[in-house]
Image (cartoon, helix red, strand yellow):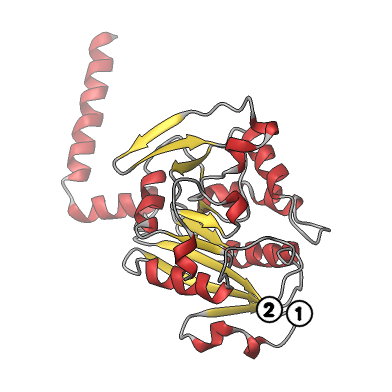
Amino acid sequence: MIDHIVHSIGQLIFAARTFFDCAECRKKFWRKNIAPVRPLPEKIEVFARHCLSSSVSQHKKRFSGYSREKCLENFLQTIDRSQANVTFILDTGNGKAEDHFLFRTQEKIVQIRQGSEAGAFLSLLDHISSLPLHLDTIIYIVEDDYLHREGWVNMLLEGFSLSSVDYVTLYDHRDKYILPMYRRLTSKIFVTPSSHWRTIPSTTQTFAVRMKTLLEDLEIHRRFSKNREISADHQKFCRLMRKGRVLISPIPGFSTHAEPEFASPCINWAPFFE
């Protein structure tokens, strides 16, 4: 019995060797049984959100000299085009598109017509999810009132080099250090070649995520923007963290929301608007 089994195994091995010695047979086998592998993405895909006017930000205290045009100027000066593509998403729901300063640039602009932050974010999700992007592509969604430090694209890449990380923000939230609600907040600390990082429970609508994760979490992102004027970003990210997602930010930050009261600490951001 054993001799018979050994003999049968020997015949199978001989047949397999004979099959794979044939180059054409090998090609047919791999074409049939192995799914084609798409090349890994070489660049981050950035989606920069703009609008003609926003009731969301009208009440916010700003740096002296602040303007969204200066935020755009800073963004264009600091983005590394060799590592990032950028598409501008312009919500024209509250005016005439040609009135926006984006049209003084040569940038790629996708126009949507919503008129609210939440509606525009939902349209952006529809746009991104319709694109034939590699599942490993890093998506960076950025609002129009943020500043960035030189090297921020590299910093995003470093953040995603940590295998346990799902979401990255470059904004080191000052509120996580000063508000009473975060008095007992604890964070896990990571280190990459250029920075320390901490886990945080939530961030704004400016964040980065891989395409695969975004698609898996798409319904959660939509849920906290549907039937709203303003997305519930804090509640959304808390829900994602309960799902087991990990969100990190660098210490110190490589970007900031342009609100001096809550600007990323340890960086003097005021000169950016001089």
The residue wearing badge 2 is 52
Q: Quadrant of residue 93?
A: bottom right
Mark 1 neighbour density, 10 Å: few (under 14) some (14–19) many (20 or more): some
Say what amino acid the circle numbered 2 marks.
Answer: Leu
Expressed as whole percent of the image width and height from the top left, the position of residue 195 reads: 35, 41
Q: Which residue appears at 65% of the width and 51% of the height?
A: 218
Q: Across the whole image, how many numbered discs are drawn on residues?
A: 2
Q: CA distance from mark 1 to mark 2?
A: 6 Å
Reply above or below: 200 against 151.
above
Q: Quadrant of residue 125?
A: bottom right
Expressed as whole percent of the image width and height from the top left, the position of residue 168 reads: 50, 46
Residue most extreme to the right: 227
Q: Which residue appears at 22% of the width and 56% of the height?
A: 24
Q: Earlier in the sequence, mark 1 or mark 2?
A: 2
The residue wearing badge 1 is 94
Reply above or below: 18 against 39.
above
Q: Which residue appears at 25% of the width and 30% of the height?
A: 12
Say what amino acid the circle numbered 1 marks.
Answer: Asn
SS type, badge 2:
loop
SS type, badge 1:
loop
Q: Quadrant of residue 201?
A: top right
Q: Which residue appears at 62% of the width and 51% of the height?
A: 261
Expressed as whole percent of the image width and height from the top left, the position of residue 236 reads: 70, 45
Expressed as whole percent of the image width and height from the top left, the position of residue 208 reads: 51, 53
| Contact check, label 1 and label 2, Cβ < 8 Å | yes
Depth order, front residue of 109/60: 60
* Side of 19 where 269 appears, left or right: right
Depth order, front residue of 174/76: 174
